Amino acid sequence: MNPRILRRSADALTIGRAVCGLPLILALQAGWQPLAWGVLLVAGLSDAADGWLARKAGGGTSWGARLDPLTDKVLILAPLLWLATEQRLPLWAVWLLLARELLISGWRAAADDGAPASSAGKAKTILQFVSLLMLLWPATWTGHVVLIRIGWWLFWPSLLLALSSAAAYLKPRSTTHQR
């Protein structure tokens, strides 16, 4: 398939995922857990799909590379903040994660290439999405209590992975001195 079409498709998925943030928050606020869960699932799958399309095209657009991590942050931090206001996660942990995300976003914005995500950063995002899907599992669905508990326990390794990947991003790169 034409790489240009693949790149445009990847960018369209990224924009679509960015738009999912508002319905996700509105559904959570309205108490429509099944809808919120579905929106988050579709958004997470679109993240995987846009990355696959960009790789298939031989690389995404510069614009997509900068927008993709920002949409991930909106879709992860919005429900995390909601969970904190509902006292289902400690606010200090969510604020720590928010600070990490803002720090890395600023660092990436200054990078010429948008600073592609590291393997640890990608693993962190996947773990966060899985944790959130479990934490937002609707009360009317089977396995509610167990899955929410698993989601709560998965949140903590995702936080540790977030902090360790931030340290790796910000660690000064060694340079060789030329004479």
Image: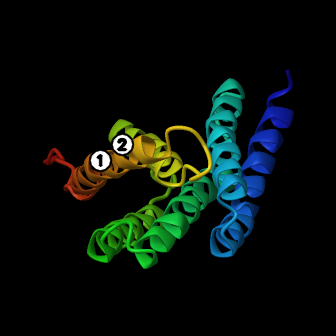
Residue at x-position 21% and y-position 56%: 167
Q: Residue at x 86, y 35 (%)?
A: 5
Residue 120 badge: none
Q: How is the image coloured?
A: rainbow
- Residue drawn where x is 53% and y is 47% of the image: 133
In the displayed structure, 23 sits above or below 136; it is below
Mark 1, secondary structure of its residue: helix
The answer to whether mark 2 and mark 1 are in CB contact below 8 A is yes
Compare residues 3 and 69 and report the one nearer the observer: 69
- Residue 142 sits above or below residue 14 on the image: above
The percent position of residue 125, horizontal first and vertical second, equals: 45, 46
Q: Amino acid at mark 2?
A: Ile
Q: Which residue is mark 2?
A: 150
Say which quarter of the image contains residue 154: top left
Rounded to the nearest angstrom, the CA distance separating label 2 from label 1 is 5 Å
Residue 116 visible in the shown view: no
Q: Quadrant of the N terminus?
A: top right
Q: Position of residue 158 (x, y in %)?
A: 32, 49
Count neighbours of disc 1 (C-alpha within 10 A) and say few if under 14, some if 14 to 19, many if 20 or more: few
Figure check: 133 above or below 119:
below
Question: Which one is in front, 150 or 156?
Answer: 150
Q: Which residue is mark 1?
A: 153
Q: Residues within 10 Å of mark 2 (few under 14, many from 20)?
A: some
At label 1, the amino acid type is: Trp
Asked if 31 appears above or below 156 in the picture, the reply is below
The reply to whether residue 49 is visible in this rendering is: yes
**SS for dot 2:** helix
